[in-house]
Amino acid sequence: MSKLLVGLLLYAVGIVVFAQSGIGMAPWDVLSDGLSHTLGISLGAAVLGVSVVLLAVNWRMGIRIGLGNILDLVITGPIVDVIQAHHLIPAAQNLSQKLLMVACGLMVLNVATYFYVGAGLGAGPREGLMIGIVRRTGWSVRFTKSGLELSAILAGTLLGGRFGVATVIVALVTGPLMNLTFDLVHFDIKSVPQVYLDDQLRILRERGACRRK
């Protein structure tokens, strides 16, 4: 559980770091940012809204839901708003600071993924959507991931989201950097068993049955 909470906290920090860089946001966050501007809501509320919709689509597609998905809804968006409301991460003032913040944001998001996935409590709603589409269409993971991110970028940009150099860098660098990060810490993503809500409910029922005996 501690790994999951650290991962979600870092995700929120990463979102704000990119927002404060002033040269674009991560692909899915461009969509959240666009919704924030269009609907007049906070960035955290928009992040929450996107996650709720994606989680509902996951469920409709038969993707198993984990505790991590639920806590993602409850924690990430509100933390984004807290960080922004208290100005905990200052805005970049020049090009050097902007590029430094993008580099820091990339590292933060990759470390966040390590903790989130390593917790073994379910894939994120974006990853779940990708898995569902791959299963139904037979498309490759790379093609599906790229298509989803491009769709999020396009929709977000049309809504006024902050698309920029950082968005392109994230789209191109995240995959290789994530592989490098996992290699450095000797982390094999395939070796992590995932526990979903139905698993946890079954365990609780079994424990209850044992106690009654």
Image (tube, rainbow, N blue to C red):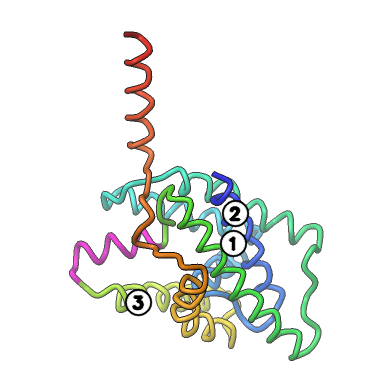
Q: Earlier in the sequence, mark 3 or mark 1?
A: 1
Kindly identify the residue that appears in the image at 34 percent across and 53 percent down.
Answer: 58
3 vs 1, front mark: 1
3 vs 2, front mark: 2
Q: Earlier in the sequence, mark 2 or mark 1?
A: 1
Give the CA distance from mark 3 to mark 2: 24 Å
Q: Quadrant of the C terminus?
A: top left
Image-quadrant location for residue 195: top left
Using a 10 Å C-alpha cutoff, classify the residue at mark 3 as few (fewer than 14 neighbours), some (14 to 19) or many (20 or more): few
Find the magenta span and give its range. Answer: 127-138
* Residue that numbered label 3 is attached to: 147
Secondary structure at numbered mark 3: helix
Q: Residue 3: horizontal and vertical position, in percent?
A: 56, 51
Q: Quadrant of the N terminus?
A: top right
Give the CA distance from mark 3 to mark 1: 22 Å
Q: Is residue 57 left or right of residue 11?
A: left
* Residue that numbered label 2 is attached to: 76
Could you tell me the amino acid type at mark 1? Tyr
Secondary structure at numbered mark 1: helix
The one nearer the camera, 213 or 116, is 213
Q: Earlier in the sequence, mark 3 or mark 2?
A: 2
Q: Is residue 176 left or right of residue 115?
A: left
Give the CA distance from mark 2 to mark 1: 7 Å
2 vs 1, front mark: 1
